[in-house]
Image: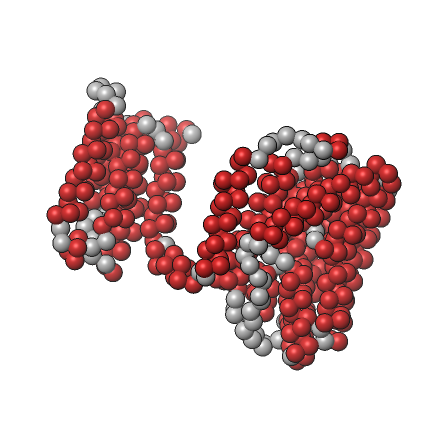
Amino acid sequence: MQAYQNLIDLIGPYMLGILISTGLGLIIGLEREFDKIKEKGFAGMRTFPIVAIIGFSLGSLTGQFSNWIVIISLGCFILFLALYHFSQKPEEYGQGLTTNLALIATFILGFMVSANFYREAVATAVIIATLLSLKTKIRSVIRNITSEELFAFIKFAIIALLILPFLPDKNFGPNELLNPFEIGSIIVIVSLINFIGYFLVKFAGSKKGIIITAILGGLISSTAVAWNYASKSKEAPELSKKYSAGIIVASAIMFPRLALMAYIFNNDILQYIALPFAILTVICAVSALLLIRNDKNNPDTNIKLGNPLDVLNAIGFGAIYLIILFAVFYSNQLFGERGLYFSAFIAGLADTDAITISMAKFSLNGYKLHLASSVIIAATISNMLVKLGITFFKGSKIAGKMVGYAFGSVIAVGLIYILFNSH
């Protein structure tokens, strides 16, 4: 802050604003100048800084005159761009609509600088420049999106933006365990994580190798990766070690994924699961590295992970969460800690997200955080047993053996932690 004040004292607040406005204009103008090389345009590295400076200068005059000077100037500027747009031939004018919008935004950014919104203006300029520079990438992505994926995105937007905000944020039912807004929020958060993971696999992991696809596939479902890779290991036994490593890596991703999920709903629980999850992640990572260190073969692979947003599946997750929520509550009421572990074991057979969220919320008041962390780890052990069973019965003998060693170590360490944590 002292250096910032010294800079103001040295050059004055007006010149500082001019410099920042010029920088903002250059950030966006540089991208537009580069775009002019490939396509015709009319504004670049000179025009954008000038527009930003005009916006700043007019904003600086509002103290002596009126705020209307900026509003009228902005209106005139938009009118000028519109007239210029329609007066030029398309082949001479080039792609002008996006540039027009960028110029208007740059004008407003200059005005923001005059109101001392320095950081906000810079951040906005960077975001605008990034969006402008991603034109080719965005077009490439759009060309590769299927109608099913587009509808999935629309359905997600409807659920997250139109349905969720109108759900009542009140507790209902036995012991007031039901909260429609809370349940809807959980469905949206889990769906969003799966949604992001799906497109990471599609655009970054598909046909890029067993390990990379497994890492990204683990963001969605490590069980799906285990199911797919176990079958492939039987089809190509010579690649059993590599597919085994993929199954183990996908399971390693599960731990930081669940840690993030738990942190979202109860940040206090992170300090209790961070160490055991880190140890279990390292065990999986080291096991995978030992399997692939001498393997030079890297064939293409592609995991079919289904619909990016299956609404029925999302509703099904909400139902599973509700069942586990009641199971956790009544198990704790009737059987104490043993009931919670039993619920975790049953829940982990199908899904680890729901029990993780449920236990994170169960310990929100800071009570029984140790117990909640142990129950979450118990659920991951149950889930590891499921994936081990899938690999053993669907995969090759070598894959079952390799995954058995890694998951056996994880299960052993997890049980030791639970026993140690319970005393």
Q: Quadrant of the rendered structure where residue 337 is? A: top right
Q: Quadrant of the rendered structure where residue 401 is? A: bottom right
Can residue 249 be seen here? no
Q: Nearer the viewer, residue 326 or 374?
A: 326
Question: Does 175 appear above or below 422?
Answer: above
Is 115 displayed left or right of 399 in the figure? left
Can residue 65 be seen here? yes
* Residue at 78% from the left image edge and 58% from the top image edge: 411
Image quadrant in which the C terminus is located: top right
* Residue at 71% from the left image edge and 73% from the top image edge: 395
Question: Does 257 appear above or below 272?
Answer: below
* Residue at 70% from the left image edge and 65% from the top image edge: 287
Q: Nearer the viewer, residue 289 or 255?
A: 255
Is 122 displayed left or right of 301 in the figure? left
Image quadrant in which the N terminus is located: top left
Q: Position of residue 193 (x, y in %)?
A: 57, 50
